[in-house]
Amino acid sequence: MLTIKQITENTDSVIKGLEKKHFKNAKEAIEKVIELNDIRRNSQKQLDDNLAKSKGLAKSIGQLMKEGKSDEAASIRKEVSEFKDISKTLEDQMEKAATDMRNLLYTIPNIPHESVPEGFGAEDNKIEKMGGQNTVLPVNPLPHWELARKYDIIDFDLGVKISGAGFPVYKGKGARLQRALINFFLDEARNSGYTEIQPPTVVNQDSGYGTGQLPDKEGQMYHCEVDDLYLIPTAEVPVTNIYRDVILEEKELPIKNCAYTQCFRREAGSYGKDVRGLNRLHEFSKVELVRIDKPEHSYESLKEMLAHVEGLCQKLELPYRILRLCGGDMSFTSALCFDFEVYSEAQKRWLEVSSVSNFETYQANRLKCRYRTTADNKKIELCHTLNGSALALPRIVAALLENNQTPEGIKIPKALVPYCGFDIID
């Protein structure tokens, strides 16, 4: 969440940033935060003054009793008691203001980086780069859901029988392709210096609030109500929460972690051709990159993450493009976000396969993820957090199947052959 320092010292720029994200009633929300913060601070000051006066008066009671001034002592006791009542009122007032302010801050998104373009939706995103070559396919190429049926590698109907729509069953070479991609992505991440983590796929409420999925995405998360646990929508949640309430040493940064997990998203209201087959699922596999860094180095880390994801697209021999998201299409928590899309020749459309984001201090402030500087004063500062998919499997699989179809079968990219153990699906 935004820090009080950000809001009070840069009020106008914060409001302008929120308006760039098309956050409704930005000015009113920020003014309310400032009002609640003033109530909290004033209550704290009055409380401190009261406690100091009460403590001073209480000390005098013993001396008055020694001097035989019992009436004066009784009067002061009454005054101390009144101070305690006032202090309790001030304490309640301060705590209420702090709670109301925190709850309001949870509903306010991160402000975008200055390089984020203006815009309302996907049509306003800026194409930063395009790579790969368009594939030449046979006449009347098949979409991946028909290829999956033809080669018996993914069974969507069986998934519906077992769980429901959005839970496909991978079979034979389809299952092996999934496992090959996971191992390939993890090996590439480790080769780039990331430490592999195997986290839980359910998290508690504190973890959801820590990375910003709660309360913003509560309706999109599967909730295990009896235990009050949430199925993760991405490994970002458990891996970043490793550093909740942690003070790191500056020499430990940047921290680079990667994790493969199953991911779960309700995708409420999703329907139509854009969600057919693997285009949008309720459960899917993904390898995630998470970085914890110093503010002055985090945008260098972002560049490195972008280069890493681009390298994966190139090694998979897929046509791709990189988009800089506009203010209206960014996530709730990100300050700057780039999407990677691969082109599906059979569907004639771009498929998003990764988002790489810098959240600056927004998540770290929620998490209380901080570091101790090496300078003489050893200040405690908020970290910057970053993450990116490297990569999400469903649409990568869809593009691989569609773009590599031939009359003989589906060819496997060279980089994946050692992982698959086969070079064609036939």
Image (tube, grey):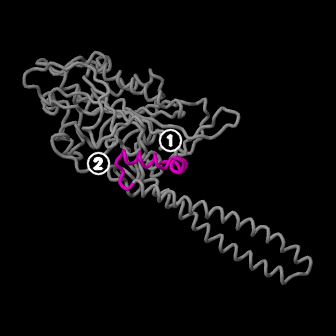
Residue 325 position within the rendered picture, expressed as x and y whole percent measured from the top left: 33, 36
Q: Amino acid at mark 1?
A: Thr
Residue at 48% x, 48% y: name it.
Answer: 2
Magenta-drawn stretch contains 11: yes
Quarter-of-image position of residue 312: top left
How far across and how far down the image is residue 180, in percent? Answer: 31, 25
Q: Please tell me whether residue 71 is drawn above or below residue 123 in the rendered image.
A: below
Rendered position, 167 above or below 256: below
Side of 78 relative to 170 (left or right): right
**Which residue occupies 28% across, 15% down?**
414
Is label 1 in a helix, a strand or a loop?
Answer: loop
Q: From which residue to which does the magenta span run?
A: 1-25
Residue holding disc 2: 266
Q: N-terminal of the two: label 2 or label 1? A: 2
Q: Is residue 135 magenta?
A: no
Residue drawn where x is 26% and y is 50% of the image: 268
Which residue is denoted by mark 1 in the rendering? 361
Give the side of residue 46 with respect to residue 330, left or right: right
| Magenta stretch secondary structure, dominant | helix
Residue at x 48%, y 23% (from the top left corner) = 193
- Tell me: residue 265, above or below residue 99: above
